[in-house]
Amino acid sequence: MSTTPDKELISLILDKSTTNQGFRALLAQYQEQLYWQIRKMVIVHDDADDVLQNVFIKIFKGVKNFKGDSKLSTWMFRIAYNESVTFLNNKAKRLQLSSQELQDHLTDKLEADVYFTSDEIQLALKKALAQLPDRQREVFNLRYYDDLKFKIIAQLLDLSEGAVKSTYHIAAKKVEQFIKED
Amino acid sequence: MKKNSIHTQAGFKVPCGYFDQLTDRVLENTQDQELQDHAGFKMPEDYLVSLEDRVMSRLGQETRVIPLPVSKTKQWLYPALAMAALFIGFIIINGLFTQDKVTFADLEDQEITDFLVDVDFMQDEESVALLFADNTILKEIEMEENITDKELLDYLMEDASLNQIIIE
C-alpha cells in the first residue's frame, strides 16, 4: 500500500474541501499500527475497538493544533497511549479493582479469548507482564513488541532516555525470573 | 517440470508430497511471526475494513449540528415562556433586593415604649415566662446586693410594675 507523507495528510485534512479524503487516508495508514498498540495495553479486542475509535475522534479534533514538533505518528501514538491509560483506569474503577488486580483479571480471561493465540509461551509472558508495575509493563511492551527505540519511548512517556533504559532492563529481568519460576 | 527433472537427474530428491504442503507451512510460519509481533493477540477478520466507515460515521455525528424540530404551533410558545421567565425573575429579584426587612433596630424607641405601655405583660403568664426564660434582662441589671433569681421573681410578680421597669 502506498503511503502518503504526513505533511500531505495534514494539509488534506486542514483543507475543508478535502478533509474527509485526508482523514480517510490517515485512518487507512495508521489504523492497524494504532490498533496493535492499544490492544497490547487494553488486552480485550472490544475495548481496543472502543479506544481506537475515540483516539481517531481526538486526532481529528486536535489535528489542526498539531504543530509538527514531533512526527505525526509519535503524536498519535501518544494520544493512543493516554487514551488507553484513561480507559484502563476507568475500567479498574468501574470493576472496583486496583490497577494490578485489573491486569490479573484481564490476563486470566485471556486463556478463553478467541482472539488470543493458544501459544503457551505468549500466555506465560502475558502473566509475567501482568505482575509488573504499569510503567515497567508499558516500557517493556513498547521496546519488546513494538521494537521502538529508547529515545522514542522516552519522548512518548515523557521520561529521560536513561530512565527508559533502566526501566526496561529491570522489567526484562523480572519477566525472565517470573517465567523461570513459573 | 523440466527443471524438476534436471534436479532429479542431478541426484537430488524431495520428500514425498513436500511441495503440496510447502505453501501451508510457509503461511503458517508467516502467521506465527505475525502473532509474535502482536504479542499473541489476534484481530477479528475484516475488522479494519469496517473500521474506517464506523469512525467516519461517528465523526459525522459528532460534528453535525442537528437543529431542534420546532412545530409551527409551538413557535409562539418559546418567546412567551421567555417573557414569563423574565417577568418572574424581575419580581423575585426586585422582591429579594429591594423589599425592606423590618428589624428591631428600625423601630423608634417611642414606638416600642408605646407598645409596651399598651400591653400589660403582667396579665399574661406566658409572656412573663418567656421574658425570664430569655434571662438577658436580668443579667444586664447590675445589682448592688446579691439577690437570688427567685427573690427577684417574687418581687417582680408582687410589687413592681414590669411595664414601668421596661419603660425606664
Image (cartoon, coloured by chain):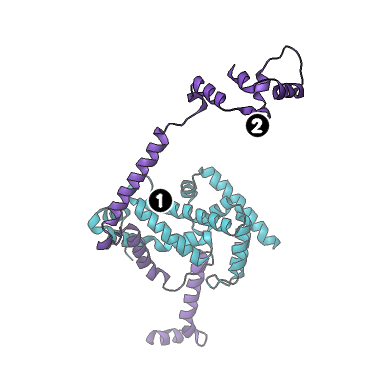
Which amino acid is tagged 2? Leu
Q: Residue at x 50, y 78 (%)?
A: B25
Give the CA distance from mark 1 to mark 2.
76 Å
Residue positioned 55% across, 26% down in the render: B118
Residue kind at label 1, given as amino acid type: Trp
Residue neighbourhood size for the residue with mark 2, other residues' Cα within 10 Å, grouped as few (<14), some (14–19), many (≥20): few
Task: State which quarter of the image contains the N terminus of chain B.
Answer: bottom left
Task: Tell me, for residue B130, which label it has, or none.
Answer: 2
Secondary element at image label 1: helix
Which residue is identified by label 1? A75
Above or below A66: residue B121: above
In this rendering, the label closer to the viewer, 1 or 2: 2
- Residue A109 placement (x, y as % from top left): 60, 68
- What shade does chain A have? cyan
Looking at the colours in the rendered structure, which chain would you say is drawn in purple? Answer: B
The quarter of the picture where residue B46 lies is: bottom left
Chain that bears disc 2: B
Left/right placement of residue B44 relative to residue A72 reads right
Q: Quick one: quadrant of the C terminus of chain B?
A: top right
Residue B80 visible within the image: yes
Q: Residue B34: x, y in percent?
A: 48, 68
Residue closest to the eye, B19 or B92: B92
Q: Residue at x 62, y 50 (%)?
A: A170
Q: Nearer the viewer, residue A61 or A155?
A: A61
In the rendered view, does A165 fall on the left or right side of B143?
Answer: left
Name the residue at 39% across, 58% down: A56
